[in-house]
Each structure stands twice: as C-alpha cells, then as structure tokens.
Amino acid sequence: MIHTAEDDEFSRIEHENKMKSGQPYHFDTYVSPSQRNAVLEEVAKEFESMRVAFGDTAASFAQYVREMKT
C-alpha cells in the first residue's frame, strides 16, 4: 500500500482526537475562597508595582484582578 500525504493528515487528525478525548487535568487540592482572594490580591499588588513601566495599563490590570475576587 502506498502511503500518501492524505494518510498522514488522517493519522494526525486521529491522534488529535485521541488527545482531546481524555481528561487533561485533574485537581484534587481544595483552595478556599480566602486563599484564592489572597493570591489575587498579591497579583494585583504586583501589577501596581509595575505602574512606573506600564502606567495606567498596570492599574487597569490590577483592578481587573481585584474584580476576580469572590
């Protein structure tokens, strides 16, 4: 049997579908809302520290991250 470029493409598509069918991530660690909020606040503070380099954009990112808190 002759192997063609079309066969390669079908093989690639089949491989991609197999990769998509499984569960790619499994998280078994619980993060409380207060822990999550603390991390988001830390990230927001880091954005604020970049204000000199990025100006209002850093402030906007900091505000966006703070709005993610629950």
Image (tube, grey):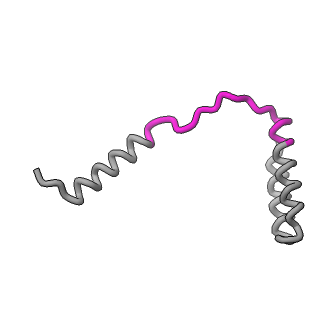
- Which span is picked out in magenta? 20-38
Q: Where residue 11 sits: x, y (%)?
A: 29, 49
Q: Where residue 1 sits: x, y (%)?
A: 10, 50
Instruction: Give me the residue at 64% from left, 32% from top.
Output: 27
Quarter location, residue 69 = top right
Whether 8 is among the magenta residues is no
Instruction: Give me the residue at 46% from left, 36% from top.
Output: 22
Instruction: Give me the residue at 43% from left, 42% from top.
Output: 19
Q: On the picture, is 29 further left or further right than 5?
A: right
| 40 to 59, vertically: above or below | above
Quarter location, residue 37 = top right
Instruction: Give me the residue at 88% from left, 60% from top.
Output: 48
Nearest the camera: 53 or 39? Answer: 53
Q: On the picture, is 8 further left or further right than 63?
A: left
Quarter location, residue 33 = top right
Q: Residue furthest left?
A: 1
Nearest the camera: 32 or 67? Answer: 32
Q: Quadrant of the C terminus?
A: top right
